[in-house]
Image (tube, helix red, strand yellow):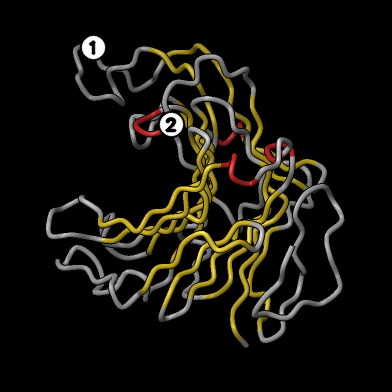
Amino acid sequence: MKFIAYFFFPLMLTVTGHAEPTKYEGYKLVWADEFDQDGRPNPKNWVFEEGFKRNRELQWYQQENATCKDGKLVIEGRKVNKPNPNYEKGSSHWKTSRKTINYTSSCLKTVGLQSWQYGRFEIRAKISTGAGLWPAIWTLGVDGQWPSNGEVDILEYYKGQILANTCWGTKKRFKPKWNAKKTPVASFNDPNWAEKFHVWRMDWDAKSIKLYIDGKLLNTTDLSKTINPTADGPKNPFHQPHYLLLNLAIGGDAAGSPKGTNFPVRYEIDYARVYQME
């Protein structure tokens, strides 16, 4: 691998897959979760979503599917068959028309607990790449309606593609303007890619957002162009603090059917770290 444009200290991680240093010259570590304590994820860092949430996804989010073990956060996707407590007979809404919950998973977020404006965000993780799976690492701005609050997809994966995206508002409510980039996993020329840990990184300052995997630049967003045309959010949603989300979605509008995928599946996160300039 080739390191360019920043300086490295020799302390490196030694577990399987891509590794990054634990210190950077000119940066200070302002927040991290190393997931070193077995059991429930640290409630000072994370809150959990509950229920069916977005994109007509199949999973019911619940806290029980996330646990820390052996220095990793494990989000487990499970196939189940249990009643939907929000079912309404005759409903046409996707959240309430389903009689049963067929899949469960977890979505953790730092909203209301931790948020940051600018910095280097690093998350080291191993994702499951089966059909219908949609693991993600992303941020949302603390103020404004989506998408005018701003969204950064440091990682999305589905259908064999790694996505690195940003979006913000348009004149039409709830319709985003995207700067999106897809990179096929096959382009990494590694038949064992899905069995290894990889490092997803965002470098964010007042001028740009740059998204990387394993030191490779995937996408750049020029923040002089990310201007909301309405009052549904701040003028520039990437000039405000954002909070972090980690989740494993299943199915839905983008990921397709999970039929053929063997459950349970695991999405493992080694650490999440935020650095800011000193």
Is 256 placed above or below 39 here? above
Identity, as a three-letter code, of the amino acid under mark 1: Lys
Tag 2 or tag 1, which sits nearer the N-term? Answer: 1
In three-dimensional space, the C-alpha distance between marks 1 and 2, rounded to whole angstroms, equals 27 Å
Residue 167, picture quadrant = bottom left
Residue located beneath label 1 in the image: 89
Q: Position of residue 232 (x, y in %)?
A: 19, 63
**Residue at image point 20% right, 50% down:** 174
Marks 1 and 2 in Cβ contact (< 8 Å): no
Foreground of the two, 53 or 257? 257
| 173 left or right of 110 in image | left
Q: Secondary structure at mark 1?
A: loop
Image point (19%, 20%), residue name: 92
Residue 109 makes an appearance in the image: no
State the image coordinates of residue 90 (x, y, percent, origin top left). 19, 12
The reply, left or right, for residue 156 in relation to residue 15 is left
- Quadrant of the snapshot with the N terminus: bottom right
Tell me the quadrant of the picture where the C terminus can be found: bottom right
Of circles 1 and 2, the one toward us is: 2
Disc 2 marks a residue whose amino acid type is Ala
Residue 152 place in picture, x, y as percent: 43, 59
Where disc 2 sits, the SS reads helix
Q: Nearer the viewer, residue 155 or 109?
A: 155
Q: Which residue is mark 2?
A: 255
Q: Which mark is residue 231?
A: none
Q: Measuring 77% from the left and 59% from the top, which residue is drawn there?
A: 19
The answer to whether residue 64 is seen in the rendering is yes
